[in-house]
Amino acid sequence: MTGAMENKLHMPEPRLVEEIGLPNGLKAEFYDCSRRLAGDRWYICLLTRVPVHVREQDFEDYAESCDIFREFCAHTGGIVHFEVKKERNFIDEREKDEVFASLLNRQKAQLAYMGHSNFARGVIRRHLAEYKERRSWWK
């Protein structure tokens, strides 16, 4: 079995542990991506994801708005994600739940940031800037 395929077999699917609605209408999703490494040692991973729908009005102040909007939406499927991954390695099995809970609580402290009224626009702008940079490589 190849190394890449072997790694996929040992990577569990992310498990949604909590969803929290934000004041700006978005939802913060918290996933447990943890897995056993060896014996009683664990890799603890919290993935925080906020899906953001791309809207045409997010492109109103771009000169090339129509073309960019169509390309960007086709490329992203109309949704971009803000994601933060918090990881800890080689955690004792007896401590894994406590470590995960600590990561989750610290990340929840960022809900005000993710719930800000301009948060979605900033996420879209960042993804658009990255897209435009990659697009310049293709030409």
Image (cartoon, rainbow, N blue to C red):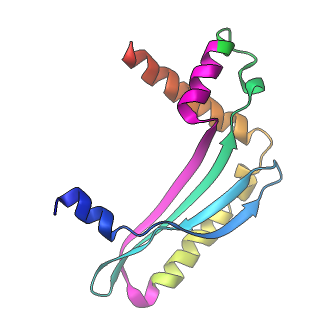
Up-down relation of residue 74 to residue 103 (above or below): above
Instruction: Tell me the quarter of the picture where residue 119 sits.
Output: top right
Seen at 58% across and 26% down, the residue is 72
Instruction: Tell me the quarter of the picture where residue 4 sits.
Output: bottom left
Q: Is 82 in the magenta?
A: yes
**Residue extent of the magenta highlight:** 67-95
Q: Position of residue 16 (x, y in %)?
A: 59, 68
Screen quadrant of the N terminus? bottom left
Q: Position of residue 71 (x, y in %)?
A: 57, 21
The answer to whether residue 86 shows anywhere in this view is yes
Up-down relation of residue 51 to residue 76 (above or below): below
Direction bottom: furthest residue: 94
85 vs 139, left or right, is right
Q: How many marks?
A: 0
The answer to whether residue 110 shows anywhere in this view is no
Screen quadrant of the C terminus? top left
Up-down relation of residue 37 to residue 5 (above or below): below
Direction left: furthest residue: 1
Up-down relation of residue 94 to residue 133 (above or below): below
Q: Is 127 in the magenta?
A: no
Instruction: Tell me the quarter of the picture where residue 38 sits.
Output: bottom left
55 vs 125, left or right, is right
Seen at 65% across and 48% down, the residue is 51
Q: In this rendered view, identify the residue nearer to me: 93 or 113.
A: 93
